[in-house]
Structure formats: C-alpha cells, structure tokens
Image: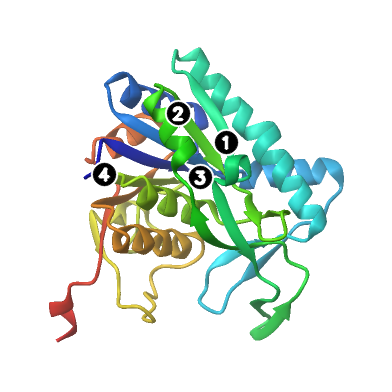
Amino acid sequence: MPDGITVVKCGGAAGVDPAAVCAAVAAESAAGRRPVLVHGASAETTALAGRLGVRLRELTGPGGEVSRHTDAAALEVLVLALAGRVKPALVAEFGRLGVPAAGLTGLDAGLLRARRSTTVRAVVDGREVVVRDDHSGRLTRVDPTLPRLLLDAGLLPVVSPPALGEDGAPVNVNADRVAAALAVSLRAERLVLLTAAPGVLADPYDERSVRRDYRLPPRGVADPAVGGGMTVKLLAARQALEGGVPEVLIADGRSGDAVRQALAGTAGTRIALTDPTDLR
C-alpha cells in the first residue's frame, strides 16, 4: 500500500524556480508527508558547457522526443552540473529551510541501473540517422533501498542521474523517466512533474489553454498538440500510471504559489491512461 510518498521532479530548464520548489517541498515535509525530489540540470549544463567551451547538441527521436546528445565531453559536463552544482545548491537550500536532505545520484549504492544504447536513432533534416557515440541509455532497474532508508530516518532524498551502466561507467538517463521509475519502486501516492509551463496545453502557444485533465492517447498514437519536452513528460506519466502510481500531475514550477497548488492537487494537468471504452 502507498505510504504517503510523493515524488516531485524539478525540471532543470531555465524558468523553473528551484528555491520556490524547495520551499513548497519543505512545507510538505514539515506537514508530515514524505517527499522525494528528483532533479535535472539542463540549463546549468548548457551554461557550464559554455564556460568550458564544450559544444552541446540535441537529438530528436523518431517519435518527437528531444534528448541531449551525450558524447563523452557532454557526459562529463552533465555530471559536473548535476552532482557539483545543482544538487549541492538544492541540499543547501533545504538546510536553510530547516529540512535535512541528502543528495544522491543513480551511482550511489546502485540506485539506478541502465543499459547504454549502442546506437541511437535520431531525425536530422527530416532523415533518420544512427548516432553511435552517445553515452545515454534506458533504466533497467531502480533499487529503492537507499531512498527508503533516508525517508525512514527523516531525511529528504534529492536524486538525479546519471545511472550506473552495465560496464560500471555512468550513463545519462532522462530525469523524468527516473522520477517515474522511482515513484513506481517506492509505491508513491503521487508523481508531480514540474516544468516551465502550467501543464499540458490545448494550444502550445497559449498558456491560458492549460488542460485540467488529459487522457493519454493509445500507444503509437501521437497528439499533434503536444511536442518537444512535453512528449517525454507524458511518456514518464504513462510509465508511472501503468506501474501503479495512483496520481500523476504535470504542473508549473516557476513560482511558489504554482508549486504549492500543484502539490495540493489544485493546479496543473492530471494525467490519466486511455479508457478502454474510448477505443470501441
């Protein structure tokens, strides 16, 4: 049975307010609930790469999902950004708010295991190509032992990629998918994916068109109104719901009020699986 755990994913894109997210998550913890924070570092990775002179590229998959091209140099910058910049700042902010937190990457105690993709298919100029130097992959296993020990000790786990590859080397994995897999493994009551948008939009150019509820289309069916980073979030939402997480929300992480409302379940978009009756 669920035991009060909420997994919150704080997007690493510019616009998401980490301090506001920490304040809202700290309030959840102070109220006796058991949050787990998962984070990315996309904006910090871009900024750090610029300072170090490392060129970053993105890959667009055949299904429209967008991911960073993680060659060896990009992987090094990513790990520095996640474990050396973003995570310490989040843990320090929780400490300032009086909430003891512990930072983890997927490398710690084998928390996240992944299989590196030997080839990655991407669409470039309308043509599908094969990329062979990518150090990203898919999660194969999540071990919730360490996060549970921290939660039971009254600590707030702060989790991020990379994962541990089969060869013992770090593998970049999508943080939204990490949050979904962790929510499933912890039997969380809710997964909240915070991003730089108020939720899933009916019109991607109009933030006032946020959908309060969104039913995922059947597998293999694309929604023309959804694209870019939201595609990956909906994949993560499907993964969590199919894994037994009762509630998944995609919500705004740009202000404290928006985050508090999302954690209260009164803002953002509530995601649901396809109703079998819709297919008849």
Q: Residues within 10 Å of mark 4 (few under 14, many from 20)?
A: some
List the residue tagged with mark 2.
Answer: 150
The residue lying toward the viewer, choosing from 79 and 47, is: 79
The residue drawn where x is 51% and y is 32% is 18
Q: Residue 173 appears at what percent x and percent y?
A: 59, 56
Q: Name which residue type carries label 1.
A: Leu
SS of the residue at dot 4? loop
Colouring of the image? rainbow
- Quarter of the rendering containing residue 256: top left
- Position of residue 123 relative to residue 31, above or below, is below
Does residue 2 appear in this view?
yes
Q: Earlier in the sequence, mark 3 or mark 2?
A: 3
Residue 104's label in the rendered image is 1
Q: Name which residue type carries label 4.
A: Glu
Badges 2 and 4: C-beta atoms under 8 Å apart? no
Badges 1 and 2: C-beta atoms under 8 Å apart? yes
Report the mark closest to the observer, 3 or 1.
1
Report the mark closest to the observer, 1 or 2.
2
**Separation of marks 4 and 3 at Cα, in angstroms:** 20 Å
Quadrant of the snapshot with the N terminus: top left
Q: Earlier in the sequence, mark 1 or mark 4?
A: 1
The residue drawn where x is 41% and y is 35% is 148
